[in-house]
Image (cartoon, rainbow, N blue to C red):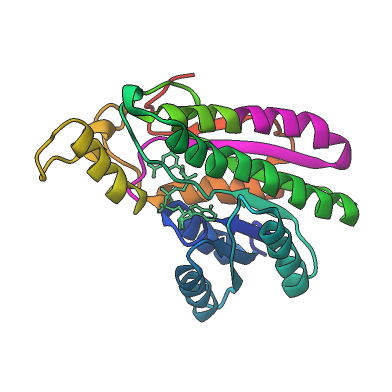
Amino acid sequence: MGRVQDRVVIVTGGAGGIGAAACRAIAAEGGRVLVADLDAAQARAVADDIVAAGGAAESTEVDVTDREQVRAMIDRAVDSFGELNVIFNNAGMNRPRGFMDVDQANFDEIVRVNTWGVIVCTQEAAKQMIAQGSGGKIVNTGSIASRQGFWDFVPYCVAKFGTLAVTQAAARGLVEHGITVNAFAPGVVDTPMWVGLNEDIRAIHDQPADADPMREFATGTLIGRPASPSEIAPFLVYLASSESDYMTGQMYMVDGGQVLV
Ligand SMILES: NC(=O)c1ccc[n+]([C@@H]2O[C@H](COP(=O)([O-])OP(=O)(O)OC[C@H]3O[C@@H](n4cnc5c(N)ncnc54)[C@H](O)[C@@H]3O)[C@@H](O)[C@H]2O)c1
């Protein structure tokens, strides 16, 4: 028996670094996974890998900010696997700018994906879980930027502080239905997201092409290096499993000791 045997788990942003690692780890523990992402081809590739390794997975294209598409994603999980037990709201993005250069378009885009997307996915997943009547688990993705403000990351910090607010509020409101809501907060994880972040940060600070802001930032952790996605994934299996049933409304740092709260 796996730790999440037969649980039906949707992972948004499942084609990306942390999301794909979560999909693989959950499937390896017996979960049935719907890999959901804007990038349909990469989501399909992750699902195909899982199936080739003997796991259960499907994939779907979704924009987490679009309610119709989110509804279709939930329906796809239920049609494929019969129910929905866990949603991992992991889809996210950032487009760093120095604070003085943030404009409304930059702000709106980042908050829309990272916070509004979490609200829409939580609402639609909760409707399905409430209708099933057997509880469920909602796991959100925060960040060290949910706990501290960073000059180049202000809309992202607002969005990720917002994810903490949504986590706490939804935990209070959904507990009567047996649904727990938690979040985890990574620090610096070596994923494709950092390709764009490194470029943006180098441009903001006029750094040379060989500068590596990701590694420089990670030296600020107690552990002193970035995490790999596979180091994060076991905690996500735990949050998806019955082992975490007594936990709700919390955001857990998994950040190598970058932020001490
Ligand atoms: N990498 C880090 O250092 C780090 C640190 C803290 C938090 N996070 C958070 O972890 C999560 C995963 O990040 P990652 O590092 O794996 O990034 P990533 O870029 O590798 O993966 C993110 C995935 O989300 C998808 N996505 C983006 N917008 C979407 C949308 N509107 N609808 C559906 N899918 C969408 C992308 O296509 C991509 O596959 C994000 O929420 C990110 O903010 C990452």
The relative height of residue 234 versus residue 178 in the rendered view (above or below) is below
Q: Which residues are magenta?
A: 164-191
Picture residue at 62% right of the left edge, 40% below the top: 116
Q: Nearer the viewer, residue 149 or 217?
A: 149
Residue 253 lies in magenta, yes or no?
no
Residue 154 seen anywhere in this rendered image of the structure: yes
The picture places residue 215, in percent across and down from the top left corner, at: 23, 38
In which quadrant is the N terminus drawn?
bottom right
Picture residue at 10% right of the left edge, 45% below the top: 210
Q: How many badges with numbers are in the image?
A: 0
Q: Residue 188 falls in which quadrant of the image?
A: top left
- Answer with left or right where residue 102 lies relative to residue 123: left
The relative height of residue 2 versus residue 234 in the rendered view (above or below) is below
Q: Nearer the viewer, residue 128 or 224?
A: 128
The picture places residue 40, in percent across and down from the top left corner, at: 51, 69
- Answer with left or right where residue 248 lies relative to residue 12: right
The outermost residue toward the front is: 104
Picture residue at 33% right of the left edge, 22% below the top: 100
- Answer with left or right where residue 179 lies relative to residue 164: right
Q: Nearer the viewer, residue 161 or 10?
A: 161
Residue 172 lies in magenta, yes or no?
yes
Residue 186 seen anywhere in this rendered image of the structure: no
Q: Residue 36 falls in which quadrant of the image?
A: bottom right
The picture places residue 77, in percent across and down from the top left corner, at: 71, 66
The picture places residue 140, in percent across and down from the top left corner, at: 60, 41
